Amino acid sequence: MLSRLNTLWTWLYYAMSWLVVLVLILHHAFYDWLLMEPIDVGGTFMGGGMAIQLYLFGWIVATLGIIVAVLLRLPGAMWGWIGAGVVPLGFGVWWQVNYPDNAEQVIYSVSQHEIGSFMLIGVLLLASGLYVRARRKPRAPDPEQMPVQFIAALLLAGFFIGVPMSIYKKQTMPHCAFSKEGQQLTVCLGDDDNERVIVD
């Protein structure tokens, strides 16, 4: 019986750790793509700079998540670090080859030079990840540290899954949405009380 419980606990530990790594890589890939995709920003406020700052913030948060996972020695965290370097390299090569031809006539959110800078960051992440992985001695998980690591992985998963889901839910709500308790959930565009929409 005790052996089964230990096996189940170990399985949950590894499953949660790899789930966190997968989610972090997906976050990194998501923001890498948004930052490196050349979008026509001509005529937009500040040339789309506000969106770029938001994407950079998301990228930094995802990077910090990977760093935390590596410091906690979660299983698969090193592959997450390496993956965070491979993804921008792949995206960068794609956009360098497929960069729009009318760049001289249109203002794009990112230049080929800036894409190259993102690729350089990817190279640094990849090289440092491979170096640390080669230098770090593999070791079996410490049973005494596993509960702490599991809780940390659970918190990371809750944050990096829960926050995007919450944002997505708010984005799909109509303008001037209110909960049944009267809490305002989204922005109202006018002063008309009839504009309110009650959502569950």
Image (cartoon, rainbow, N blue to C red):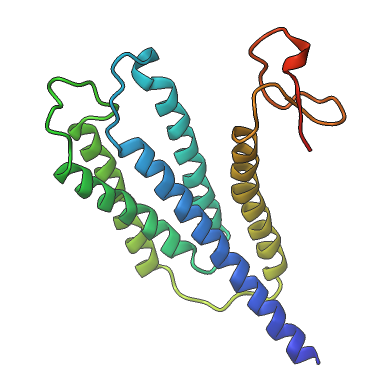
Going by the image, does 14 lie left or right of 104?
right
- Find residue 10 and report its image quarter: bottom right
Residue at the outermost right position? 181
Position above or below: 129 against 13 = above
Residue at 29%, 56% in the rendered image: 127
Is any part of residue 32 visible from this angle? yes
Q: Quadrant of residue 106?
A: top left
Foreground pick, 90 / 14: 90
Tell me: residue 184, above or below residue 55.
above
Is residue 74 something that shows in the picture? no
- Residue 151 place in picture, x, y as percent: 71, 60
Residue at image x 35%, y 36%?
A: 35
- The C terminus: image quadrant: top right
Name the spot of residue 125 as percent of width and height, x first: 34, 51
Residue depicted at x 42% and y 57%? 81
Instruction: Check the picture and name the quadrant holding the N terminus.
Output: bottom right
Q: How many marks?
A: 0
Q: Residue furthest top?
A: 191
In the figure, is residue 119 to the left or right of 193? left
Identify the image quadrant of residue 56: top left
Query: In the rendering, at what x and y percent does residue 116 appear?
Result: 21, 39
Q: Is residue 150 above or below residue 85?
A: below
Residue 85 location, x and y as percent? 33, 53
Q: Is residue 75 above or below residue 156?
A: below
Q: Residue at x 37, y 21 (%)?
A: 48
